[in-house]
Image: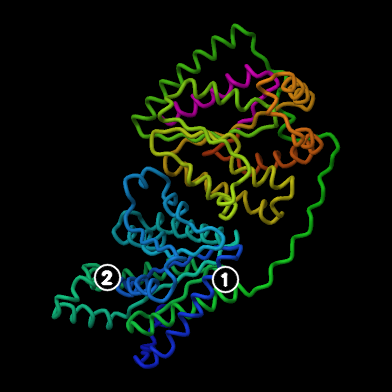
């Protein structure tokens, strides 16, 4: 595989100086055009040639307009980053539409280094490579232009480089101990690198193998490839809009999951007060233990309009430490959020170890409101099931407790609550024309909920369908479910 990059090509100084000015102009013009585009550009620079990777990072500022490209040389995770799921630090740095970012020492390099230094075994390495492939595929399918460059140095060239550095102390810092480490374990490194490229080389995010032996050839190869890909994407005609999805039946639902929820479930007042107080005390104690043990909790609340999510959340926050609990109320995405992959804004909200985050609405908007209202095409919301499952799997692998609640009521109860809100001065703001309009799409939402639960309720991040026609019953059920999950983990 890497042998194909070992061409030994070399470009003379005069040829390089003739070609580079034109390339610089073309790239800068493309950068300006990108600012008006509806997609981001993600450039990955990785490889077995540390000096070659450094060369490209240096050249970015010399050949491109540094104002319009973000450079992220990641390296080891900080303490703050180490308290979140592994990919948190990458997601929060992803560019939005019209932006470009160059990543080095990123997810691929991290996986390779951890395997070579025996921090993970072969099975763990393979699992990480598959996750990287999915991550990059998600970005590309979400609209990003993903360009990946693997900088390779032949063993003979590396040996010559090290020998030269030993004779010239001014070069020693540029070669670094990593180069000697690479040379000593060259066969093992190449075997692991070859596997990385094989698994993560996808049609939408392919690797470009480039030899790093000659500085000028390396620069031209990388930046000419970058320009060609960027220009081709900028000049591509916009895709045809997908055909509208068939409207769901508006007949009364006959669902296989939601109809099993006992909407007649109730609690007598005295029992409610007793169980609520006991549950809140238990939740507080478990929250203290979770903080000490570094167990993070993510709670997701979805449900019909007026199902009582706010009331449930208030009962939870009254029983938790406000310093370590945060409620994220999710509405329509801001312009900045809309410019990124839809999961970007949720990755950014993940808390440190020992904390709790409560999502009032969540990433499931992609397969609920965006699906039903037509804001996401069918290919997008169908792809989201796998993306969401992978996202939640990463949360739980990082030690997070993930619990998801659907608060279920029937149409008659919803209408009664709407009318009660209209008669309550401090609740009038909660009722809009959209609330009544959405009632006309009940069957469509019911169908979306059915499929959401069926496809995304997993052993590590289960859905809990909570009967919420009687608010006290729902509040107690949710708190007791959270406590059970925390006790199981602790």
Q: Earlier in the sequence, mark 1 or mark 2?
A: 1
Q: Residue furthest top?
A: 270
Q: Nearer the viewer, mark 1 or mark 2?
A: 1
Q: Residue at x 54, y 79 (%)?
A: 228
Secondary element type, mark 1: helix
Return the x and y of residue 211 as percentages of the image width and height. Answer: 38, 80
Q: Quadrant of the N terminus?
A: bottom left
Return the x and y of residue 267 as percentages of the image width and height. Answer: 64, 12
Instruction: Decide if residue 320 is on the left or right side of residue 363.
Output: left
* Residue 471 shown in magenta: yes
Q: Residue at x 49, y 13 (%)?
A: 278
Q: Main secondary structure of the magenta part?
A: helix
Protein image colouring: rainbow
Residue under pointer 1: 33
Residue under pointer 2: 182
* Residue 205 shown in magenta: no
Depth order, front residue of 153/198: 153
Question: What residue span does the magenta drawing correspond to?
Answer: 464-490
Return the mark for residue 490. none
Task: Please rate how many residues cluster around mark 2, counting C-alpha atoms within 10 Å: few if below 14, some from 14 to 19, many from 20.
Answer: some
Please say if 405 is above or below 271. Answer: below
Return the x and y of residue 115 as percentages of the image width and height. Answer: 34, 59
C-alpha span from label 1 to label 2: 40 Å
Question: Is mark 1 in CB contact (under 8 Å) with mark 2?
Answer: no
Instruction: Decide if residue 271 is on the left or right side of residue 255.
Output: left
Task: Please rate how many residues cluster around mark 1, counting C-alpha atoms within 10 Å: few if below 14, some from 14 to 19, many from 20.
Answer: some
Instruction: Decide if residue 254 is on the left or right side of residue 120.
Output: right
Q: Quadrant of the C terminus?
A: top left
């Amino acid at each position: 595989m890497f042998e194909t990059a070992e061409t030994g090509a070399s470009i003379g100084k005069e040829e390089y100086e003739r070609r580079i000015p034109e390339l610089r102009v073309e790239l800068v013009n493309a950068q300006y055009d990108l600012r008006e585009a509806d997609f981001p550009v993600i450039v990955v620079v990785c490889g077995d040639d540390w000096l070659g990777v450094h060369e490209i990072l240096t050249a970015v500022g010399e050949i491109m307009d540094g104002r319009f490209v973000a450079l992220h040389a990641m390296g080891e995770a900080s303490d703050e980053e180490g308290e979140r799921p592994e990919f948190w630090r990458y997601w929060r740095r992803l560019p939005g539409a019209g932006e470009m970012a160059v990543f080095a020492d990123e997810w691929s390099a991290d996986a390779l280094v951890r395997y070579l230094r025996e921090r993970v075994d072969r099975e763990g390495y393979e699992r990480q490579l598959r996750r990287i492939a999915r991550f990059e595929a998600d970005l590309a399918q979400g609209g990003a232009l993903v360009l990946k460059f693997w900088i390779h140095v032949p063993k003979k060239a590396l040996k010559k480089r090290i020998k030269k550095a030993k004779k010239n102390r001014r070069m020693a810092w540029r070669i670094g101990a990593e180069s000697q480490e690479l040379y000593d374990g060259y066969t093992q490194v190449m075997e692991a690198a070859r596997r990385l490229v094989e698994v993560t080389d996808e049609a939408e995010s392919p690797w470009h193998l480039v030899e790093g032996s000659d500085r000028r050839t390396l620069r031209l190869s990388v930046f000419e490839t970058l320009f060609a890909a960027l220009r081709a994407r900028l000049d591509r005609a916009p895709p045809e809009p997908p055909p509208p999805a068939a409207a769901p039946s508006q007949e009364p639902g006959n669902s296989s999951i939601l109809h099993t929820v006992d909407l007649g479930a109730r609690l007598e007042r005295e029992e409610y007060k007793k169980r609520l107080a006991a549950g809140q005390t238990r939740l507080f104690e478990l929250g203290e233990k979770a903080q000490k043990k570094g167990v993070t909790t993510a709670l997701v609340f979805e449900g019909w309009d007026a199902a009582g999510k706010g009331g449930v959340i208030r009962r939870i926050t009254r029983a938790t430490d406000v310093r370590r609990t945060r409620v994220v109320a999710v509405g329509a995405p801001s312009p900045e959020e809309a410019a990124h992959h839809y999961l970007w804004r949720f990755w950014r909200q993940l808390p440190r170890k020992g904390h709790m985050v409560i999502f009032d609405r969540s990433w499931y908007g992609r397969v609920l409101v965006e699906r039903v209202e037509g804001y996401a095409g069918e290919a997008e919301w169908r792809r989201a099931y796998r993306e969401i499952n992978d996202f939640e799997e990463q949360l739980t692998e990082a030690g997070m407790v993930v619990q998801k609640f659907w608060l279920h009521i029937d149409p008659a109860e919803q209408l009664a609550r709407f009318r009660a809100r209209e008669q309550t001065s401090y609740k009038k703001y909660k009722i809009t024309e959209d609330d009544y309009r959405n009632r006309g799409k009940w069957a469509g939402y019911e169908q979306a909920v059915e499929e959401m639960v069926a496809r995304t309720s997993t052993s590590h991040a289960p859905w809990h369908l909570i009967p919420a026609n009687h608010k006290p019953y729902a509040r107690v059920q949710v708190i007791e479910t959270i406590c059970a999950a925390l006790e199981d983990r602790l």
